Image (cartoon, grey):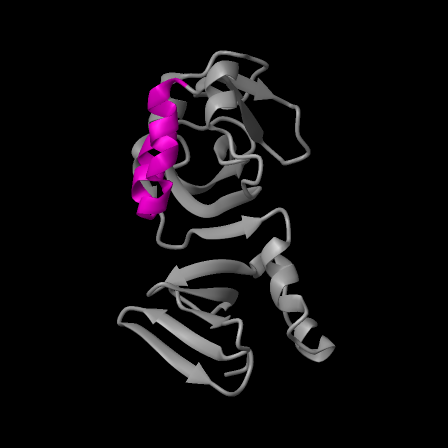
Amino acid sequence: MFGLFKRKKIESWEVDLLENALRALPKDFNIYNEQIALGLIKGVSIGNAAIPNYIGFTRDAEIYNAINDPKGRDFEVYGIMVFDIISNTYLEYSIFFSFGTVDGYSIKKTGKYKIDTKKIDVRNMKLRFRDNFDFERIKKKLPIKDLELINPNDVYVVNLDNKEYFHLADIKDGDFYAMDLEKNFYRITHDPYSFEKIDIRFNA
């Protein structure tokens, strides 16, 4: 667990951390632990991506071919905080996904670290899509002056009460602004869970 070396074998703490983090995320992420249980991940590949500190997973080809989704989104879950025993602080942990499978991870730390795989905080986790399918869906519905206020990486679909809402921007503590396909805007809070329809945009 000390630092990053050119290696191919996945270490037990990496699997434990990944599985525990996935369990802490919303239930939609349970499927990725099911993939791990099938034996999808066989090892790691280091230094093959432009993402800082990225550790890619090598996969069992037969299992991957059986379960991958050619239309699966390319995205990152970031803002997960994991505890480093050496520095006695929490570090940011990101998990990457592509084609419906878990793809790799990164830990934002230069030098040595030793992770307590049970101390995981996902309260401020966020999604970042590395494609822009959802942004393209709402792009046609908004005037340019509104589009200039939106970061395409912040736009993703949230299904609530059997309806699609497009996350536009975070407010605080998991609350966010959203819109639907009818161009209605909302302030959505999670504690307490509520929808507030708003007429103004991001300065509401």
Height in image: 73 above or below 15?
below
Height in image: 94 above or below 86?
below
Q: Position of residue 28 (x, y in %)?
A: 36, 45
Q: Tell me where the magenta segment starts and ends, as one range.
A: 18-39
Height in image: 121 above or below 6?
below
Residue sitting at x 33%, y 22%: 37
Rendered-image quadrant of the N terminus: top left
Q: Is residue 56 left or right of residue 82?
A: right
Q: In front here: 180 or 122?
A: 180
Height in image: 101 above or below 3?
below
Q: Position of residue 26 (x, y in %)?
A: 33, 48
Q: Quick check: is 43 in the magenta stretch?
A: no
Q: In front here: 84 or 64?
A: 64
Magenta stretch, overall SS: helix
Residue sitting at the far right: 144
Residue sitting at the far bottom: 199
Locate residue 56: give its quadrant: top right
Residue sitting at x 38%, y 64%: 173
Residue sitting at x 52%, y 16%: 61
Q: In this view, does 168 lie to the left or right of 15?
A: right
Q: Position of residue 182 (x, y in %)?
A: 53, 77
How many numbered marks, from 0 up?
A: 0
